[in-house]
Image (tube, rainbow, N blue to C red):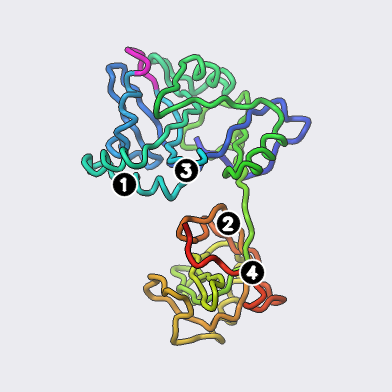
Amino acid sequence: MLATPGALPSAEQDDRWAYETKQDGQRVVAYLEGDGGLVLRARSGDAITGAYPELLPLGGALGPVPAVLDGEVLALDPQGRADFQLLQSRMGLAHAPRRAAGRAAATPVHLVLFDVMHLGGRPLLAVPYAERRARLLELGLDGPFWSTPAALVGHGAEALRATREHGLEGLVCKRLDSRYEPGVRSRSWIKIRHLQGADVIVGGWLPGRGRLTGLPGSVLMGQRAGAGLRYVGSVGTGWSEAERARLGVLLDGLESAACPFDPPPRAPGAHWVLPRLVGEVRYSTRTRAGLLRQPSWLRLRPDLTPEESAADLPDHHG
């Protein structure tokens, strides 16, 4: 079951909703088979159990009782916050057990559990969220590499403020009376992501495909670092068709043979431009390498020159 982007429920509806921290990890469904076995499946349906060997003991946590649980695999930074960059070093190793074991020792993961869909052979999909959550908490699934954080009922505005103040990704709001709808992006679950803003300098673009043929599919962004321009990622969403066409005209007039980024990014097929255009984007977090995660274009900033666009980036990103 997937959440729909949206806003907080109204104050009048607040006590009909539960609030959970939005986690920045890999969504999984955990199958506890009742004989000590465990299977983890990603949203794609692929079995990824082998990538996370430290989670295998979860298979015996309920003894002979089989269960199907919903959760998210996280890698935590020293402050205990989910860090997707750390998690990426653990993903994709489902069929490389030796490498997975080595990475598990260096960067252990933590599985946050937030729903139960089947328990003891009984399907709970039609049971209201509030009852499913109570059943999940009763299972006492808190171990060395997994936990079941409580959800907050009501007080959504306070929950949203707290996640922002603590630098967390956002909030998920869930109707207390909602059933579990596998594979459905439901309005009964609402996700709110805290976004940050940044001024960026356009240094190049990549051609669009399909209906975007002849237009920029994405632009390559930079920010000032000393006397140079450091690449901070690409953005391809946030424009209307008219805005994308206008941007294409502006980029054509700035075409350049030289890459303006130092160091140059790996961007096969890129068209470089003189770094004169400034734009504003929204993004979720910045990776340790300095790239903007999940950026979305907000607007051009013709009122800013590249020199005025933003404070210099540090020379190194740690």
Work out how far the residue at label 4 is from the one at label 3, CA to CA, in angstroms: 27 Å
Mark 2 and mark 4 in contact (Cβ < 8 Å)?
Answer: no
User: Is 77 above or below relative to 239?
Assistant: above
Name the mark nearer the viewer: 3 or 1.
Answer: 3
Q: Residue 189: image x %, image y %?
A: 59, 35
Q: Give the spatial CA distance, label 2 vs label 3.
A: 20 Å
* Residue 14 lies in the magenta stretch: no
User: Which of the two residues, 213 or 64, is positioned nearer the viewer here?
Assistant: 64
Residue 283's tag is 2
Would you call the spot at circle 1 few (<14 residues within 10 Å), some (14-19), or many (20 or more)? few
Q: CA distance from mark 4 to mark 2?
A: 15 Å
Label 3 amino acid?
A: Asp
Give neighbour class at mark 4: few <14, some 14-19, many 20+ (Cα, 10 Å). Answer: some
Q: Which residue is mark 3?
A: 77
Q: Which mark is residue 310?
A: 4
Q: Which one is earlier in the sequence, the residue at label 4 or at label 3?
A: 3
Q: Amino acid at mark 2?
A: Tyr
Is residue 166 left or right of 80 when viewed as pictured? right
Instruction: Point out the frontmost of discs 4 and 2.
Output: 4
Residue at (65%, 72%) from the top-left corner? 309
Out of 70 and 210, give the one closest to the viewer.
70
